[in-house]
Image (spheres, helix red, strand yellow):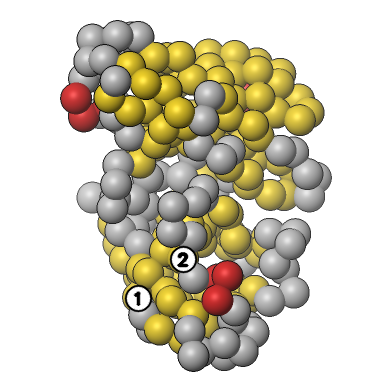
Amino acid sequence: QVTLRESGPALVKPTQTLTLTCTFSGFSLSTSGMCVSWIRQPPGKALEWLALIDWDDDKYYSTSLKTRLTISKDTSKNQVVLTMTNMDPVDTATYYCARSNLVVPAGFDPWGQGTLVTVSS
Amino acid sequence: EIVLTQSPGTLSLSPGERATLSCRASQSVSSSYLAWYQQNPGQAPRLLIYGASSRATGIPDRFSGSGSGTDFTLTISRLEPEDFAVYYCQQYGSSPPTWTFGQGTKVEIK
């Protein structure tokens, strides 16, 4: 059974750096094709893809946010970490991680339950 | 970057009715990289359809996807109470590699 779980602070102040961790089980990020993405959703709004890291340690970022994002992985711990710098109230959202496969594309599946991050002073 | 536009924004239907949701891309999308998700309030999205028309594991056959190029459709043949939710389409573009979601269609009880 594949599961993912997001963890991190529920509240950050403006200008601070957010660090989120996705801990997963049921698959290995060293397996060819495997990827983990971060996706966010502001309250009442649509989903927005942020970043993806693949089995070969290639990293891809949202064009609009790439200067603020860093994604990394620790294969031995089955974890993927996302950092987002210079947080602003508009970054308040539920942040999800999800698995995908670049070799056999089949969407993002499954997703973690999400973690709500509020940006406020 | 490819923009996905979903219509309508809200669809008001009764249980048992047929729902037809549209997803239009600003430029041609490979069918292999078009997916649909369902999201219920307070829950994470769930993959319904990938490759434009393939149902994900455990998805009932009342859900079907179709389309190619710039126009894609999600059809729910007979709405069940648990189908009233928000639906998102999503695509993968390779130049540069990015993943894009539509703005969503809410299917509500009439």
Q: Nearer the viewer, mark 1 or mark 2?
A: 2
Report the label total. Answer: 2
Q: Nearer the viewer, residue A96 or A29?
A: A96
Quarter holding residue B26 = top right
Q: In the rendered image, is residue B53 in sight?
A: no
Residue bearing the label numbered 2: A93
Q: Examine the rendered structure and indicate whether residue B72 appears above or below residue A6.
A: above
Q: Secondary structure under badge 2?
A: strand
Q: Position of residue A91 (x, y in %)?
A: 55, 71
* Residue B43, x across and y down, in percent: 29, 50
- Which residue is at 41% across, 32% downward? B106
Residue pictured at 74% horizontal, 38% vertical: B2
Residue A42 can be seen, yes or no: yes
When the figure is inspected, residue A67 is found, relative to residue A42, above or below; the finding is: below
Q: Residues within 10 Å of mark 1 (few under 14, many from 20)?
A: some
Q: Amino acid at mark 1?
A: Ser
Q: Nearer the viewer, residue B93 or A25?
A: B93
For the residues labelled 1 and 2, the Cα–Cα distance comes to 14 Å
Farthest front residue in view: B110
Residue B42 image position (x, y, % from top left): 28, 53
Query: Which mark is on residue A7?
Result: 1
Residue A98 - label = none
B94 relative position to A94: left or right = right
> Which residue is painted at 58% across and 70% down in the image?
A90
Classify residue A57 as left or right of residue B83.
Answer: right
Question: Could you confirm whether marks 1 and 2 are on the same chain?
Answer: yes
